[in-house]
Amino acid sequence: MAVKIRLKRIGTKKKSYYRVVVMDARKPRDGRAIEEVGIFQPLVKDEDKQIRLKDERIHYWLSQGAIPTGTVQRLFTKSGLKIEPKNKKPRKVKAGNEVAQ
């Protein structure tokens, strides 16, 4: 099961806010979540109150293999949450395409 940390839209038209949730990647955007790990309110003027996250639960889910979406990753950085990037495979360089030094 592919688990993602993503946003779930809540609220009325033009007054939306979002829950940061852990979900199965195959579920719809506003479907049933496994766990709610935070709230994002973009319409709040005070930037300190826009994002509220449960740091311990986020680190737990990341250790279990959950993948944050791009938007959620930016929210983590904005809120100051330190996340170690996954080890990416090194890119293969084709012969003849080396950078000249």
Image (cartoon, rainbow, N blue to C red):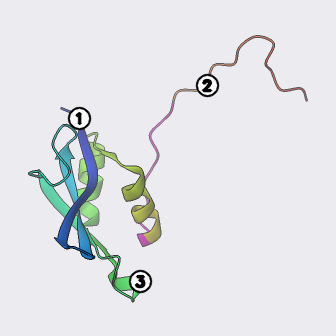
Q: Residue at x 30, y 47 (%)?
A: 62
Residue 44 is marked as: none
User: Which stretch appears magenta?
Assistant: 79-88
Q: Residue at x 59, y 26 (%)?
A: 90
Image position of 69 (left or right of 27): right
Image position of 86 (left or right of 16): right
Q: In the rendered image, which residue does mark 2 sit on?
A: 91
Q: Residue 22, percent across and down?
A: 20, 51
Q: Secondary structure at mark 2?
A: loop
Q: Report which quarter residue 94 is drawn in.
A: top right
In the image, residue 64 above or below residue 42: above
Q: In the rendered image, which residue does mark 1 sit on?
A: 2
Residue 47 is marked as: 3
N-term-proximal mark, 3 vs 1? 1
Q: Secondary structure at mark 3?
A: helix
Q: Residue at x 40, y 63 (%)?
A: 76
Q: CA distance from mark 2 to mark 1?
A: 24 Å
From this viewpoint, which residue is outermost toward the bottom?
46
Let me know if residue 29 is in the magenta part: no
Q: CA distance from mark 2 to mark 3?
A: 38 Å
Q: Which of the pair 92/42 is nearer the observer?
A: 42
